[in-house]
Image (cartoon, grey):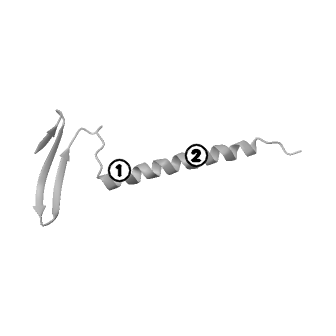
């Protein structure tokens, strides 16, 4: 087991060949992700910011009055 601070415990549950099962005990307010999941979340967040910026730019066109 590995302790991180007072509230987080990392436990090696099983080792089989080249696979390792890891358990994480942490408070509900601590987000725990595998690296590839964390990277995917970050990429989605970046894409959402770009899309929001594009929507803001488009909304400026809707305020232009036709003559």
35 on left or right of 65: left
Q: Which residue is located at x 27 percent, y 39 percent?
A: 28
Q: Which mark is residue 13?
A: none
- Pick out the residue farthest to the bottom: 17
Q: Secondary structure at mark 1?
A: helix
Hey, which quadrant is residue 26 in on the image?
A: top left
63 on left or right of 45: right
Mark 2 vs 1, N-terminal side = 1
Q: Which residue is located at x 51 percent, y 51 percent?
A: 47
Q: Which mark is residue 52?
A: 2
Residue 25 placed where, x, y %?
Answer: 19, 43
Quadrant where the N terminus is found in the figure: top left
Quadrant where the C terminus is found in the figure: top right
Q: Which residue is located at x 30 percent, y 49 percent?
A: 33
1 on left or right of 46: left
Residue 44 placed where, x, y %?
Answer: 46, 52
Residue 31 placed where, x, y %?
Answer: 30, 43
Estimate how packed mark 1 is, as few (under 14), some (14 to 19) or many (20 or more) residues with alpha carbons within 10 Å: few
Hey, which quadrant is residue 66 in on the image?
A: top right
User: Disc 1 designates what residue?
Assistant: 38
Residue 39 placed where, x, y %?
Answer: 37, 52
**Can you say whether 16 is above or below 47 in the image?**
below
- Real-space Cα separation, disc 2 to disc 1, in angstroms: 21 Å
Q: Which residue is located at x 35 percent, y 50 percent?
A: 38
């Amino acid at each position: 087991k590995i302790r991180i601070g007072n509230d987080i415990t990392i436990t090696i549950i099983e080792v089989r060949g080249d696979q390792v099962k890891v358990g994480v005990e942490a408070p509900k307010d601590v987000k725990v992700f595998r690296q590839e999941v964390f990277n995917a979340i970050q990429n989605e967040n970046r894409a959402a910011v770009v899309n929001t910026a594009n929507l803001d730019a488009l909304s400026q066109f809707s305020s232009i009055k036709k003559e």
